[in-house]
Image (cartoon, rainbow, N blue to C red):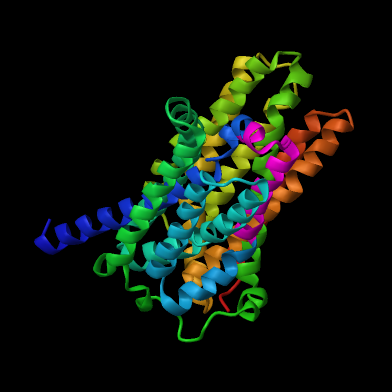
Amino acid sequence: MTMAAQADSRQDVQVIGLISFAHLLSHLYMLALPPLFPQLRTDFNVGYVELGLMITAYAVTTGLLQTPVGFLVNRIGGQRVLAGGLFLNALCISLAGLATDYWQLVALMLLAGAGSSVFHPADYSILSARISTTRIGRALSAHSLAGNLGFLAAPPLMVLLSAFLSWRTAAILVGLVGMVLAIAIFFLTALLSGEGKTKSKQKDSWGQLLSSPKILLLFAFYVLSSAANSGMVHFSVVAFKEIYGLPVTVTAMALTAYQGLQMAAVLPGGWLADKIENHELILALCFGLSGVLVLTAGIGGLPFWIVIALLGTAGAMRGLVNASRDVSVRHAATDGVSVGTLFGFVTTGYSGGQIIGPALYGWLMDFGHPELVFWGSAGFSTLAIATMMVNRATPRG
């Protein structure tokens, strides 16, 4: 390896490490307060409904602002947007530890959600501009894995800190980490700036997003794949309980296998995305196999250890194509829309799937047919495959 290649490799590792750590914190902040709900309920004299609405406030501003933040990234660059958003997000989590009234918490969560909205538009813009093309798949997979690790770390970390200190001190401390990282990101211009090399000459607009068939198909894919996943995450445990007549302590093992192997397959999926060209075909194959496995697991009559293996493999198939999905979105940015804006827009579709899916699966459970949860998930996966195949055949605008 030449000295120039070594320098490029070192820079890639530094950029991936910084951006992935920021992404990890963003996911940790999403789940920072829920593990502390018992203490918050006592301190603020509110019920779980009020606490749930507080988290809803966070999610609403995060979802609604991602595309507008993408426009901002296109105008001023991802580095400053990421630094500002991370600082706001982290500051609000710290200030939650100083709140004296419930409505202060709601206001802080609205602002924290606004800060959280920057991560996908800014992160993907920076990674796309600063990472070598030969490593972009692995960079995107590391970024995705870091977010999952943030979700995984939040409950035990917050519970442990609150046990030894207090919930208020725990919130302040984890927020301080993000503020320090935000300041570092702001000053690391030489390492993280330079998205201008990938910006389109024309500024992004809603018209560009809504008039591109390829972009709308990617948005639909995110909606459908998210809806398919929500069936497994939110309802597979109770559905398996009804189908197999087993306690939830046993049926939960299938969901653990699904999520655990999905996470384990993310990094190998990055290597795969760097080695292949037809990312849509890989997405279709893996989603198709995942749907078949989910459907088979839900038919009933199988030894439950086989169900666990089936659902674990289905999760691995989904994790394996995370990077290929993101590379497909990155390629669509050549339609005249910047990478940051495009990722912000399609990620909003993911939120849409999370809204549609749970209500539908809950209705199927109430209808008395738990096996339809798995039919529904497989059906959404099939529709997601169709969007990618049509996307592959659609010429660029």
Residue 174 showing in the rendered view: yes
Residue at the image point whose x is 69% and y is 51% from the top: 353
Residue at the image point whose x is 37% and y is 62% from the top: 127
Residue at the image point whose x is 68% and y is 26% from the top: 297
Residue 236 located left or right of residue 184:
right
Residue 85 vertical placement versus 354 (above, below): below
Residue at the extreme bottom: 202
Residue 378 showing in the rendered view: no
The quarter of the rendered structure image containing the C terminus is: bottom right
Q: Residue 337: x, y in percent?
A: 52, 76
Residue at the extreme left: 3
Residue 259 vertical placement versus 197 (above, below): above
Prevailing SS of the magenta stretch: helix
Q: Residue 30: x, y in percent?
A: 55, 46
Q: Quadrant of residue 315?
A: top right
The image shows a total of numbered marks equal to 0
Q: Quadrant of residue 232?
A: top right
Nearest the viewer among 395 and 41 is 41
Q: Determine if the magenta segment contains residue 243.
A: no
Nearest the viewer among 340 and 86 is 86
The quarter of the rendered structure image containing the N terminus is: bottom left
Residue at the extreme right: 367
Q: Residue 276: x, y in percent?
A: 41, 54
Nearest the viewer among 45 and 304 is 45
Q: Determine if the magenta segment contains residue 52.
A: yes
Range covered by the magenta-colored residues: 40-63
Q: Quadrant of residue 201?
A: bottom left
Residue at the image point whose x is 50% and y is 62% from the top: 118
